[in-house]
Amino acid sequence: MTEQVQPAPRSQRPTRRIIQGALSLLLIVAIFWFLLKGIAFGQVWAAIQSLTWLELATLAAVAGWNLCTYALVWMSVTPGLGFWPAMVMTQSTTAVANTVPGAGPVVGIGMTYGMLGSWGYSRSKTTTAVLVSGVWNSFIKLGLPVLALALVALQGNAGGGRVIAALAGIGGLAAAIVVFALMLRSEDGARRFGVLAGRVASRLLRLIRRPPVTGWELATVKFRARTIDLVQHRWPAITAASLVSHLSLYLVLLLALRHLGVAEAEVGWAEVLAVFAFARLATAIPITPGGAGLVEAVLIGGLVAAGGAKAQVVAAVLVYRALTWLLPIPLGVGCYLWWRRQPRVPSPTPAPSVVAAARP
């Protein structure tokens, strides 16, 4: 009798995660080493220490408001969800996304299902909320660079590279809107998109020796039916909450720059918005947890190129990231521990066959 040897993917997962974590850490270290070499850290620290109590208070207030806007987005896509549960969920999942290499967004989505399920939300409603919030987030990430570059152009600072970037952004946004519209237009269109997406995903999974996906055409048809009902009644609230969330994050960066000595004459607010928008695009693919290193690289490189003094820009970016990347980690841990102590309400429906990933 020939013995068949079964693969043991579970035993390989810890090794793979360790490798992913090590590679992410090496990438972050390399990026920071390149960005910060030649910088007089005394000047950076002196700039941070020069912040007055009023400036610190305004930064803390704006950063706190920014964290609250995450909850507003989820309240808009999950009818009936209260502010405090939405805050607990978003802070917990953000902490995971900011710390777990590679699989952070996936783990965060799993936590979203667990938390919403504990409050009585079915998995089908959670799936719709995850997908709709992700779609709106993608629309705004693609649209912000176009808006920002248009504003820069209106101020007379449009170069050839910026025009090309704006055109590329318009093309990406248009393609995303067309795909979304075709999915919602008809059941047959949603089914065809699901089949096509499933084939692409299966081919990619084949490269890493994973089994093909199944049932994506059924999932897209169900997504279409649920999304139409949600979007028809709540698209203004979803759009407004998503915009406020992104612009509040931008406001934290702008305020940090101004408080730390990067004046409007050096880098205008529209140029800051443009750099911020492209930094947001850098987080579309979770190469490092929470875009650590990549976001700093785009922000520092872009703002210095726009005319900001490097020491002040570095100080402002470090303060900005401390308030928007580091601060949610302990807050999220506290929120998660609080949730673990609460009673559970079982979810009334079985798990869906397909779960798609989206932000935060």
Image (spheres, rainbow, N blue to C red):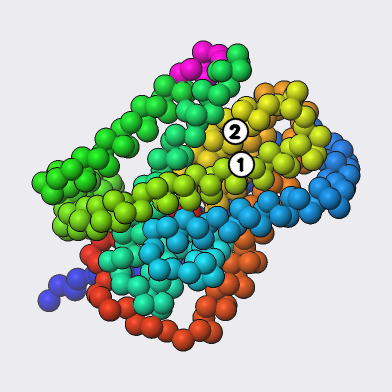
Q: Is residue 118 left or right of residue 2?
A: right
x 84%, y 50%: residue: 54
x 39%, y 58%: residue: 77
Check disc 2: other Cα within 10 Å, few if <14, some if 14-19, many if 20+. many
Amino acid bearing label 2: Leu
The magenta stretch is 158-164
Q: Main secondary structure of the magenta part?
A: helix
Secondary structure category for the residue under label 1: helix
Establish if 196 lies above or below 1: above
In which quadrant will I find the N terminus? bottom left
Between residues 237 and 215, which one lies in front from this camera angle?
237
- Labels 1 & 2 near each other (Cβ < 8 A): yes
Amino acid bearing label 1: Tyr
Q: Is residue 241 left or right of residue 192?
A: right
Q: Is residue 90 left or right of residue 106?
A: right
Q: Position of residue 87 (x, y in %)?
A: 54, 66
Q: Is residue 110 visible?
A: no
x 40%, y 48%: residue: 236
Establish if 282 lies above or below 223: above
Between residues 355 and 58, which one lies in front from this camera angle?
58
| Label disc, if present, on residue 250 of the rendered structure | 1
Measure how far apart labels 1 and 2 are at the Cα level: 7 Å
Q: Is residue 329 visible?
A: yes
Secondary structure category for the residue under label 2: helix
Of mark 1 and mark 2, the one earlier in the sequence is: 1
Judge whether residue 132 is colored magenta.
Answer: no
Where does label 2 land, which residue?
273
